[in-house]
Amino acid sequence: MTEPTVERPASDAPLREMPAVTEATVERLASGVPLRDVLDVGAAGPWTDLDVEVRASARYRPGLLPGLAWVEGRSGPTVSSLIAAAVGRLRRERGAESAVESVEPLLALALCHPDGRVRAAALARAREYPDLLPLIVVRAADWAEPVREFARELLRDALDVDAAVALAPLILLVGRRDRGDFGVRLLGEVLRRAPGERLGPLYGSADRNVRRFAHRLAVAEGFLSPTELARAAARDGDAVIQDLCAEAALKTVSGDVGDDVLRPLLTARNPRARSCGVTALRRAGRAAEAERFLTDRSAVVRACARYVVRQLGTDPLPLYRAWCSELGRPEAGGEREPGRTREPKPETGQAREPKPDTGQAREPELETGQAREPELETGQAREPEPETGHVRKPEPETGHVRKPGSGQGPERGSFVPGPGAVIGLAECGERADAVLLWPLLSHPVPAVRARAVAGLRLLDVVDAGRLRPLLEDPAPGVVREAGLALLPSAQELPSDWLMARLGERWPRYVRVAAFRLLSAGAGIVPLRAAVELLEDPDPKLRCWAEQAVQRWHPPAGLPSGEAEVEALLDRCTHLFSSYVLRRRKWEAGVGH
């Protein structure tokens, strides 16, 4: 039988193929094949899978497993014992070590036997085989109390620091079971007594639960220095670890803290770590530096920066107003026809017209450096220098772009305000501040246009007539924000104009925004839009359209007997049973 294979990453080796636990795995163990040749003994999953697979095999092939007589050393004419005896004779000719290996796989099967007496007897012999310690971990959460208590005694005696580090993934996996808490508690007790550096492999484990457990233990016991906590908060991709380590690092900040703690937090990609870093600036006596983060791309970081700046007696609102005024000046690139982008041509640096057939701007040649590129770490546009056309590098902490000749220090006013300044004005401003946002709808940077639309929505000053052209914007983010802002005014928009944007010649994001607005319309409009998209080339849009058709019911106020309703429902017969279709038509007063 050919065994299916799965791939798993190893911490110190490239991807390799390992056999999955199947019925064939049990057969090979019963024939005396060593565990390391059958299972990936370094992983946690195969051990629990083996436990399940052995019990499944015992239901219809009980003779394949070793019985109580064999485990206790008495004669037992089972299939597995006969096979093992034959294999043992061959292996004894090769040496004692091979003879031991022929017993170990049978004990592994006995430890997973459905009969508790067999499992208990196998535990008594398993202490002689270190490679069977993972199965003792599994049995420490056994449903049979005698087996469970015996396994816990063995585990307490055998689990040292090295074994705890190696078996941590399995112990935490088994710890999810109803009776698995013992192993987790024992793991914590052993690792607390160990030197902090022994937990190093757990901090970088591929198992997220192992990393969380190790970092929680390290924070509680003080195994990690503030610098190590800051780096962990900045580098780990798990949100729980980010919060845990960032908060722990923040508690250690005082007036003499150095850049070795603050810089990893302030330059982190995740906003949780950055927000803690900004808050730490005040405790470190460097609150003035928080002004640079008022335009951060993350709302939580901007909120923390406003708090820190206000502690200095500075009102952030005038700063936001000044930055938005600067972005809206014509010389700052604030002139543009709404709904159409113009990007610089790589040859001349002049405005690039969008393609006439799609309305999308032609892609700039990256090697020329003329077109603005999004900064990978910040998502903000890089401004090309007017003299050379070279892209300016943003500051690593905030993503702000330094002006030429501004020096290395991030001084006040030394950077071009980014899209975060636009949404920041809306977060702490007044409705009257919308006058600074309207000109930004024609800004050449898509992120600025998108934040301007979001800011107008946040200030509750949406004008459907002025925002509707942005539904044709070549930037998907702008279209999404425009659709969200126009949603409360969906019934005021011309349905024919929106229906025309459902055509295949429009980009997908335009069709999605138009469909959402039409779905929020009144009367027959949502059904008309959904039926129009039933043949859309995008499978997700087709699925959404089918669900919208099935959810549609004639609303109050829809005239009874509308012929268009009957025609539209007749195009959707494949979505309803005959009864439901007749019911829908009856509700609409058609099809009698």
Image: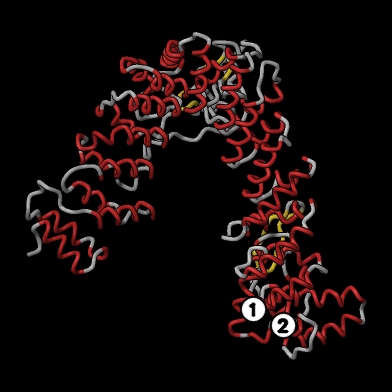
Amino acid identity at mark 1:
Asp
Of callouts 1 and 2, which one flags the residue occurring earlier in the amino acid sequence? 2
Cα separation between marks 1 and 2: 9 Å
Find residue 562 and report its horizontal and vertical position in percent: 9, 53
Residue 165 visible in image: yes
- Direction from residue 212 to residue 436 in the image, left or right: left
Write down the residue under mark 1. 115
Callout 1–callout 2 Cβ contact below 8 Å = yes
In the drawing, what numbered circle is on residue 445?
none
Q: Which part of the image, by quadrant, shows the N terminus?
A: bottom right
Q: Nearer the viewer, residue 103 or 345?
A: 103
Say which quarter of the image contains residue 230: top right
Relative image position of residue 491 (x, y in whole percent) = 20, 37
Q: Nearer the viewer, residue 515 or 196?
A: 196
Viewer-nearest residue: 480 or 66: 66
Quadrant position of the C terminus in the picture: bottom left
User: In the rendered image, which quarter is residue 182 located in?
Assistant: bottom right
Give the residue drawn at x 25%, y 29%: 464
> For the residue carrying disc 2, how many other residues have a C-alpha within 10 Å: few (<14), some (14-19), or many (20+)?
many
Residue at the spot 54% in from the left edge and 20% down from the top edge: 293
User: Is residue 180 depicted above or below 482 in this figure?
Assistant: below
The residue at which mark 2 appears reads as: 68
Q: How crowded is mark 1: few (under 14 residues within 10 Å), some or many (20 or more)?
A: some
Looking at the image, how many numbered discs can be counted on the residues? 2
Which residue appears at 52% of the width and 26% of the height?
A: 301
Q: What residue type is labelled 2?
A: Leu
Q: Within the image, what quadrant is residue 438 found in? A: top left
Q: State the SS at label 2.
A: helix
| Residue 186: % across, % down | 70, 53
Instruction: Report x, y in % for residue 136.
Output: 72, 65
Q: Which of 590 and 246 is in front in this view?
A: 246
